[in-house]
């Protein structure tokens, strides 16, 4: 292995797949939900946004469907 490498001639190249990796979205969550994921973030050492993404990805991969029944007044 060399002691010195010359990176001056090397051209930087942006990742061509960066746009395919994640899609930025705006989502409004209630405070209790954000607080819950932030507390999980402290326990796990992962950012809370990543935890939310992991949970939603798990729901999508297992094709979970929300089951809710609204009561009429």
Image (cartoon, grey):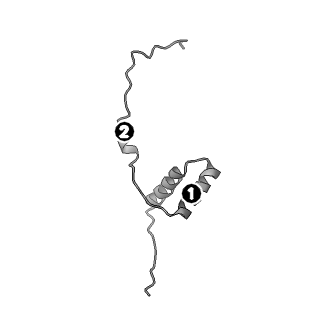
Name of the residue lying farthest toward the bottom: 73
Q: Residues within 10 Å of mark 2 (few under 14, many from 20)?
A: few
Q: Quadrant of residue 13?
A: top left
Q: Which label was assigned to residue 56?
A: none
C-alpha distance separating marks 2 and 1? 28 Å
Q: Earlier in the sequence, mark 2 or mark 1?
A: 2
Name the residue: 58% across, 59% down.
Answer: 35
Asked if disc 2 and disc 1 are in contact, CB closer than 8 Å, the reply is no
Quadrant the C terminus occupies: bottom left
Q: Secondary structure at mark 2?
A: loop
Q: Secondary structure at mark 1?
A: helix
- Depth check: give the residue in front, 14 or 38: 38
Vertical arrangement, residue 20 with respect to residue 30, above or below: above
- Residue 30: x and y in percent read 50, 64
- Taking the spot 45% from the left edge, 65% from the top edge, the residue there is 64
Question: Horizontal and vertical percent for residue 28?
Answer: 44, 60
Count of numbered labels shown in the rendering = 2
Q: Is residue 48 left or right of residue 26?
A: right
In this rendering, is residue 35 above or below 72?
above
Instruction: Report the front residue among 4 and 28.
Output: 28
The N terminus, quarter of image? top right
Where is residue 19? Give x, y as percent. 36, 42
Question: Could you tell me residue 36's position as x and y percent?
Answer: 58, 60
Nearer the observer, disc 2 or disc 1? 1
Residue that mark 1 sits on:
37
Query: Which residue is the site of mark 2?
Result: 17
- Mark 1 crowd level (few <14, some 14–19, many ≥20, 10 Å Cα): some
Most distant residue in the front direction: 31
Residue farthest toward the top in the current orientation of the protein? 3
């Amino acid at each position: 292995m060399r002691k010195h490498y010359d990176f001056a001639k090397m051209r930087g190249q942006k990742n061509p797949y960066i746009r395919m990796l994640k899609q930025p979205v705006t989502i409004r969550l209630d405070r209790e939900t954000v607080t819950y994921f932030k507390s999980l973030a402290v326990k796990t050492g992962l950012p809370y946004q990543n935890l939310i993404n992991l949970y939603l990805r798990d729901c999508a991969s297992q094709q979970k469907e929300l089951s809710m029944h609204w009561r009429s007044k």
